[in-house]
Image (cartoon, rainbow, N blue to C red):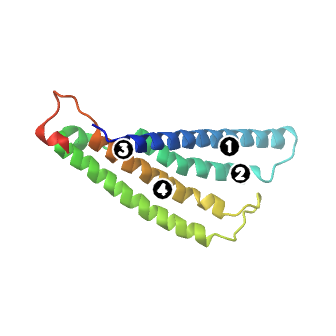
Amino acid sequence: MTPAWAATFDRVCDRVNRLTEIAIGLLIAATVAVTFLQVVFRYGLDSSLSWSEEFSRYAFIWAIFLGSGAATRRGQHMAVDLMREALAGPARWLLELFIALVGVVFFVVFGYAAYLLTANAMGQISTALEIPIALIYISAPIGAVLTVLHLVNGVLQARFRPTAPAARTDAAAL
């Protein structure tokens, strides 16, 4: 049976992911709209928007890093399932735990390095939009935090997920 705190954590992760996916959708829609507007201005009005390329690039960067956490929540990152499918019971649980822990370590290190780069970018301003570059760089540590959040939640939910009585073994109570 899933403890109340683990179920609450899962609901929080679900809400965070919904907000993240809404933000990703808005960013992609804005990228498409601004790119379309640039085409209209360039070829229809024989003029150009000086900021459209930079906006589209930065919105896409944000969508990518936010998307890492959303993909983790949905279990949609690329994976080789051959070994996982070959294992069952405790061996499979240990493999999934190992994979999640490697992911957590990677994204913690990545997030920390991205944070240092963000701090280093303080004071730098983008060319066309004239916004702090740190506002773009901060997307990487935020994406790393979201990914770690969903990796940890995935481990917790797998740990406490109830199994069908026929499939339960003595060691399935991990």
State the CA–CA distance, disc 3 to disc 4. 21 Å
State the CA–CA distance, disc 3 to disc 2. 39 Å
Query: Where residue 170 appears, x then y in whole percent?
Result: 11, 39
State the CA–CA distance, disc 1 to disc 4. 22 Å
Q: How packed is label 2: few (under 14 Cα within 10 Å), some, or many (20 or more)?
A: some
Query: Where residue 141 appears, x then y in whole percent?
Result: 52, 59
Image quarter where the C terminus lies is top left
Residue 79 horizontal side relative to residue 65, left or right = left
Identity of the residue drawn at 61% across and 38% down: 25
Q: How packed is label 4: few (under 14 Cα within 10 Å), some, or many (20 or more)?
A: many
Q: How packed is label 3: few (under 14 Cα within 10 Å), some, or many (20 or more)?
A: some
- Judge depth for marks 1 and 4 and give the one in front: 4
Disc sitting over residue 22 in the figure: none
Q: How many marks?
A: 4
Q: In the rendered view, would you say 94 is above or below 127?
A: above
Pointer 2 residue: 55
Pointer 3 residue: 6
State the CA–CA distance, disc 2 to disc 1. 7 Å
Pointer 4 residue: 144
Q: In the rendered view, would you say 149 is above or below 81?
A: below
Q: Earlier in the sequence, mark 3 or mark 1?
A: 3
- Judge depth for marks 3 and 4 and give the one in front: 3
Mark 3 and mark 4 in contact? Answer it, CB < 8 Å.
no
Mark 1 and mark 4 in contact? Answer it, CB < 8 Å.
no
